[in-house]
Image (spheres, helix red, strand yellow):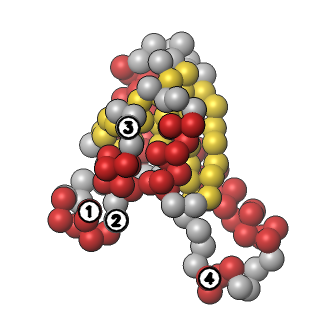
Amino acid sequence: MKILLAIDGSANSTRAAKYVALHWQANAEITLIHVDDHMHEYITEHLDADSICRLHIINSRAALRGPERVLTRSGHLFEERMLVGDPGMEIVQWAKKNRSDLIVMGSHGRGLLKSLFLGSVVVKVLSNSNTPVLVVR
């Protein structure tokens, strides 16, 4: 089974990683993906391209740290992907392109009304993906 584990650096992402570690065998193909949103124009106009790239890498490394630990301790092998863009759409596109069997995500549990106004990544993935999505709360 090919599992795409979408990570945002929150405790909810680590909880999703624990769920995967507990419920899937160690031979599952797991890809940890972190999509760093584009930086605000105000920031990018004051930095060179290398600095922007370094910041995206730092953000992704920090976000992946907890889930990496969980999966490593449980004996699961995994690969990592760090992308920049619209998190919801990048997750959906990656899952489709790589023929993932399942997308697993942690939820912040803000509720439906707030999620619609805030543009929740989970809501965007759920509404745009043909790949089954498991939301861990």
Q: CA distance from mark 4 to mark 2?
A: 20 Å
Q: How many marks?
A: 4
Q: Determine whether 117 is above or below 115 in the image.
A: below
Query: Could you tell whether 64 is left or right of 16 in the image?
Result: right
Q: CA distance from mark 3 to mark 2?
A: 19 Å
Marking on residue 115: 1
Tell me which residue sits at (55%, 21%) in the image: 29
Q: Secondary structure at mark 4?
A: helix
Q: Which residue is mark 4?
A: 41
Among the 4 quarters of the image, the one containing residue 42: bottom right
Q: Which residue is mark 3?
A: 130
Q: Residue 116 in the image: x percent, y percent?
A: 25, 65
Q: Determine whether 46 is above or below 50 in the image.
A: below
Marking on residue 119: 2
Mark nearer the N terminus (1 vs 3):
1
Front disc: 3 or 2 = 3
